[in-house]
Amino acid sequence: MKNRKDEGVRFLGFVAGMAHLLAVSSPASTEVIPHELLQDLPVEVTAVATRVVECSSWSNTEVTSEVDDARVERALEVLRCNSLPNELSILRRKYALSARTVKAIDFLLTLLP
């Protein structure tokens, strides 16, 4: 029988690893999400928050060559940046009864490129 706590810990480790990978492979983000806004949010909301920051960062990257343009386009595609508004809308409906989560989602919507 699988232990759900172990599964959750492994998933969080995966999310942390992916966030680190994105941070290492992308330009530094100028967008900062207040730490207290992300505390105790559902994991899927914090995962989308990471993508919002990364998409914003890549969208604001200065493109000076075709190679840069291809790199930025690829990053935006891999991060599925075009789907973020819809995903945030779905999460907002899903967590409509959690004022704290809705507030965080509304803040994330302001960061979208």
Image (spheres, rainbow, N blue to C red):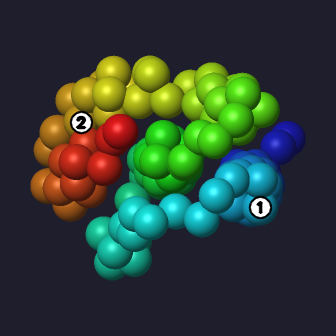
Query: Residue placed at 25% from the left, 43% from the top?
Result: 109
Residue 8 drawn at (x, y percent): 68, 53
Residue 10 drawn at (x, y percent): 79, 54
The image quadrant of residue 112 is: top left
Residue 103 drawn at (x, y percent): 18, 55
Closest to the camera, between mark 1 and mark 2, is: 1
Amino acid carrying label 2: it is Arg
Q: In what quadrant of the picture does the N terminus appear?
A: top right
Q: In what quadrant of the picture does the C terminus appear?
A: top left
User: According to the image, label 2 marks what residue?
Assistant: 92
Amino acid carrying label 1: it is Val
Q: Is 103 displayed left or right of 17 in the figure?
A: left
Query: Residue placed at 40% from the left, 69% from the top?
Result: 32
Q: Residue furthest right?
A: 1
Q: Is 22 displayed left or right of 43 in the figure?
A: right
Q: Is 3 displayed left or right of 65 in the figure?
A: right
